[in-house]
Amino acid sequence: MVDIKTDASLESMRAAGRVVAQTLTAVREAAAVGVPLTELDETARAVLREAGAGSPFLGYHPSWAPTPFPAVICASVNDAIVHGIPGSYRLRDGDLVSIDSGATLDGWVGDAAISFTVGRARPEDLRLIDTANEALAAGIAAAVVGNRIGDIAHAVGRVCRAAGFGIPGGFGGHGVGRTMHEDPGVPNEGRPGRGVALRHGMVLAIEPMLIGSGTDRHFTTRDGWTIRTLDSSRASHAEHTVAITDDGPRILTQL
Ligand code: MG
């Protein structure tokens, strides 16, 4: 069932979303060659603590995962697409880093992700990151009353495919509200005019994930969480929590 938020609830979700944006900004600033991923998680925890916010990631334990998620961010480096656990790995020159983070404030959740490079960037990585951001922007532009979920999915997928990048099947966006994952699912590829009709008060996380080689193939590593590309090519991820409103899409997870 798709939950429709009141305007007051959207304001609360905006506050939660702002904390997510602050978290991602701080993590990006802290990320540098030699910095361990655990330190990025510590940085994120400090921002959440300062804001009086909780983490919808920490302790999250879906049925498919062997263990509860142990951190407040996902840190997915290079060939990791999503759901990377921030461990002792220290960032290296030229790494492509994707950080996904969430915040819970007054019972409302925000969810967003960014990708960036550390040290000397490879041009092909910058293109992979730029395209994820373009696909996200296209998805957001399609998140308008009168459209359907398939219009968002189509907009996202078209940008990714036109650039020659792969899309890992089975992963995508979702409704957001009191919990991190609500109906409806928001696939990263789809047919326009299909699926749930978009209405004022719906809140969606839109999150393109791209594979640089153009393959869609991926696998789950032995930690039970991290999703990696099968051919070891690099991946990027971008995400915003977006409210559908009569005045157009409203990005909740920005500063
Ligand atoms: Mg999400």
Image (cartoon, rainbow, N blue to C red):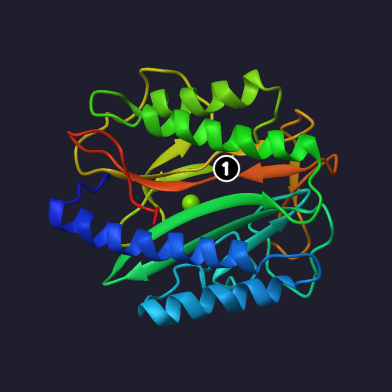
- Residue at 36 percent across and 27 percent down: it is 195
- Residue at 71 percent across and 32 percent down: it is 216
Place of residue 53 in the rendered image (x, y in percent of width and height, measured from the top left): 37, 75
Q: Secondary structure at mark 1?
A: loop
Q: Quadrant of the C terminus?
A: bottom left
Residue 50, quarter of the rendered image: bottom left
- The residue indicated by pointer 1 is 171
User: Can residue 180 be seen in the rendering of this structure?
Assistant: no
Q: Quadrant of the N terminus?
A: top left
**Up/down of 119 relative to 156, above or below:** below
Residue 74 located left or right of residue 92: left
- Residue at 71 percent across and 22 percent down: it is 164
**Up/down of 9 relative to 44, above or below:** above
Place of residue 73 in the rendered image (x, y in percent of width and height, measured from the top left): 57, 66
Three-letter residue code for mark 1: Phe
User: Can residue 30 be seen in the rendering of this structure?
Assistant: yes
- The one of 243 and 153 positioned closer to us in this rendering: 243
- The one of 66 and 4 positioned closer to us in this rendering: 4
Place of residue 161 in the rendered image (x, y in percent of width and height, measured from the top left): 64, 22
- Residue at 51 percent across and 42 percent down: it is 207
Residue 69 located left or right of residue 80: left
- The one of 58 and 43 positioned closer to us in this rendering: 43
Residue 22 located left or right of residue 232: left
Residue 103 located left or right of residue 219: left
Place of residue 226 in the rendered image (x, y in percent of width and height, measured from the top left): 70, 58
